Amino acid sequence: MRTRIGVLTILGLLTLASCGDAGASGKLETITGQDVTVRMFDNRYEYNDIKVPVGGSVTWLGAGRNAHNAEDAGGTWSTESVFGTLDQYRGDEATITYDQPGVYPFFCSYHGNADGEGMAGVLTVGTAE
């Protein structure tokens, strides 16, 4: 009986470990395309390294239980400007078209900051020099 409980405990711990937040590892999850969708999970973006051409768009999609958003650390764009509020919940979409080339660090105002800590990433529009 003791052996069986030990095996079940180990299997349970391995299952919990496999459900961990891959985005929390610090690894850059990259997406590139003309028009991309980025899901905003609880405390992480699906992709934190986003590349679109000038004129490309990103659809910021709520996918977590809590409110999320995306804001440019430099203040030039925010999902609030197209969605009407900072609070995006599961299923809420805000699509932004990016017409100016550049590198835009972004963050969720609830779970990250403009210094790139927490729920944050980098959007590159056009080619980065």
Image (cartoon, rainbow, N blue to C red):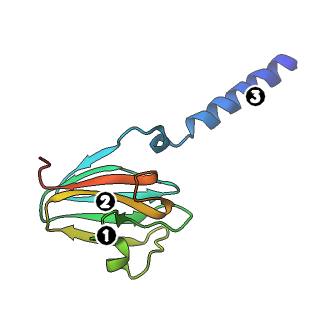
**Mark 1, residues whose alpha carbon is within 10 Å: few (<14), some, or many (≥20)?**
few
**Where is mark 3, residue-wise?**
9
Instruction: Write down the quadrant of residue 119 in the picture.
Output: bottom left
Secondary structure, mark 3, is: helix
Specify whether residue 45 is in view.
no
Question: Which quarter of the figure is the N terminus placed in?
Answer: top right
* Front: mark 1 or 3: 1
Secondary structure, mark 1, is: loop
Separation of disc 2 and disc 1 at Cα? 21 Å
Kind of residue at badge 2: Thr
Kind of residue at badge 3: Thr
**Mark 3, residues whose alpha carbon is within 10 Å: few (<14), some, or many (≥20)?**
few
Locate residue 39, reporting x and y percent.
40, 58
Tell me what residue is drawn at x 20 percent, y 69 percent: 97
Earlier along the polypeptide chain: callout 2 or callout 3?
3
Residue 37, disc? 2
Locate residue 127, reporting x and y percent.
11, 50
Separation of disc 2 and disc 3 at Cα? 38 Å
Earlier along the polypeptide chain: callout 1 or callout 3?
3
Instruction: Write down the quadrant of residue 35 in the picture.
Output: bottom left
Tell me what residue is drawn at x 44 percent, y 75 percent: 86
Tell me what residue is drawn at x 39 percent, y 82 percent: 84
In the rendered image, the residue lying farthest to the right is 1
Tell me what residue is drawn at x 49 percent, y 42 percent: 24
Residue 117, disc? none
